Image (cartoon, rainbow, N blue to C red):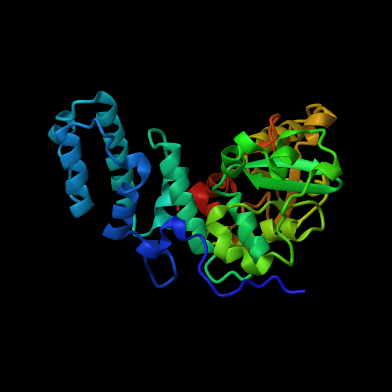
Amino acid sequence: MSDLLLPGDFWVASGHAFCDRDAEGRLVATPDLWRAFLARPELLPPAEACDAELALHTTLLADPLRPVAEGTLAALADPDARENWGHVLRFRDRVMEHPTLEAAWLALFRGPVGGIPPLFLGMLTHLVTRAAMEGEGSAFTLRAAEILFRPQRAAIHQGATLLADEEVLDARAGDLGAMGRLLTEAGARPREVELEVLSEATAPGYAARSDAHDLALDIAEGRPGAHGLARALERLIGHVIGEPVAIRPVPVLDHRHWTWHVGLDAEATAIANALWQGERVEQARLARILWLGALEFADTARVLPRAAGRPVYLALAMDAARRVRAKPQNLAAGLPLVARESGA
């Protein structure tokens, strides 16, 4: 059976349509992208905003890239507004130092990223992931890629390892539907649950509902979602980092070939580091690992000698509260590339 998408754009809310593209398909920020950024609800001046803040917002909407003097920020009456607009302008300026959004993403996460609100970094990750998935026909790969920029909640149930969008679950918290019960009650019985999981039947409609983030994904071993996550990571690494790789899901770490690993979130990093250092890890904590992958580079000449010819293990985990907080930026600084150590 095919999981090809029906024709249609996906992740429209990322704002990718407001970007230009260079010859390699990487995103170039435009004034319209920054206008869309400034029009986000989080950045709209509140009803009680002073005239100076209203004027600043209006001016930037008209000319999003114009310099803003320190005195302009100092004139804002609310100290929180001064701080927030300082974050906005520093983020804009740091992104615009680079020719593409992908280059900005790499530079931010390979350098000091302090002082940039997570919201802004998540928006940037959303955009570069969207560019990396351009032309992708598999709904399973695209839904798996949502994990890279959307927090998830996990449930392990009858052989399935299900991930569902946390924001969607929270929005339904007042009236817990089937998905909410499954992912918030560890003891839910099968007859109590009717969860719409991405499947061959629902895959053709993914594009039309992609911005709703309302489909759960099964990433258990052997399932299409597990392979979809591998493909999503391949595409992200190839597009943003520029390294062609092949990734395959694996059931366990093979200690005979384990020389390098990258945790795709803080919990997976901590567990893998503890195992690497020979520490005893409780079985209950090991069970938090939801997905493992083995990455191999197409060009081993750029791989550090101690890792060349051996798989780089990737791990994704949930925390004690069953939350999954992916950190794809770990790939930016964590892969064993010679260029990274030489500063290239």
The quarter holding residue 215 reads bottom right
- In this orientation, does residue 94 appear? yes
**Horizontal side of residue 187 vs 316, given as left or right:** right
Query: Horizontal and vertical percent for residue 105?
Result: 44, 50
The quarter holding residue 16 reads bottom left
The quarter holding residue 43 reads top left
Which residue sits at x=21%, y=48%? 60
Closer to the camera, 270 or 138? 138
Is residue 227 shown above or below 40? below
Is residue 83 shown above or below 199? above
Which residue sits at x=67%, y=56%? 229
**Horizontal side of residue 142 vs 27, given as left or right:** right
Query: Which residue is most to the front?
Result: 175
Closer to the camera, 5 or 83? 5
Query: Horizontal and vertical percent for residue 287?
Result: 80, 36
Q: Quadrant of the N terminus?
A: bottom right
Which residue sits at x=18%, y=31%? 50
Closer to the camera, 313 or 115? 115
Which residue sits at x=37%, y=40%? 42
- In this orientation, does residue 63 appear? no
